[in-house]
Amino acid sequence: MVEKVFSIAKELRVGKYVLIDDIPCRVVQIESSKPGKHGSAKMRITAIGVFDGQKKTLLSPGDADVEVPIIDRKAVQVMSISGNTAQVMAKDTYEVYDMDIPEELQGQVEAGKEVDILETMGRKKMERVR
């Protein structure tokens, strides 16, 4: 399965995803400089890690290739909750697995409810409660 594709840096927009140091990140700010006499425009892309929340910066020429992760969004049903872990079931494959509940969703996740998850590069993250 393909986990990432290539895109041109100047096609990135705020809110899109990019790989920085093989970590999937969401772009929060883009700064670009004018092209100089002997070079192309440079771009400073600031992004926040999807899974760890760390701030990352990518410096790249505007016409250079950047890696973009393939993001898969799914709706899953919460089967049970044990502490900070929820057992969820995928609606399409009926696969059951455990996921950590993020701090911002602690009181909202309940058995029987549906949650949206984000999956990329073999990792999964609970995003919101439906």
Image: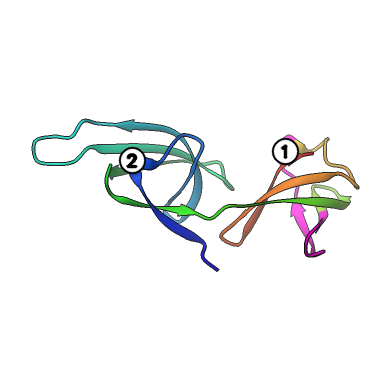
> What secondary structure is found at the residue carrying circle 1?
helix
Q: Please indicate whether residue 4 sits to the left or right of residue 81 in the image.
A: left
Residue 10: which numbered mark, if any?
2
Q: Which residue reaches farthest bottom? A: 1
Residues at marks 2 and 1 touching, judged by CB atoms closer than 8 Å: no
Residue 1: which numbered mark, if any?
none
Rendered residue at 56%/41% (across/down): 53
Q: Amino acid at mark 1?
A: Glu
Query: Looking at the image, is mark 2 or mark 1 earlier in the sequence?
Result: 2
Q: How is the image coloured?
A: rainbow
Rendered residue at 73%/45% (across/down): 116
Q: Which quadrant would residue 35 be assigned to in this image?
A: top left
* Whole-number angstrom distance, CA of label 2 to CA of label 1: 34 Å
Q: Is residue 53 above or below residue 92?
A: above
User: Label 1, on which residue?
Assistant: 103
Q: Please indicate whether residue 112 sits to the left or right of residue 7 in the image.
A: right
The picture places residue 86, in percent across and down from the top left corner, at 82, 51
Residue extent of the magenta highlight: 87-104
The picture places residue 29, in percent across and down from the top left corner, at 42, 31
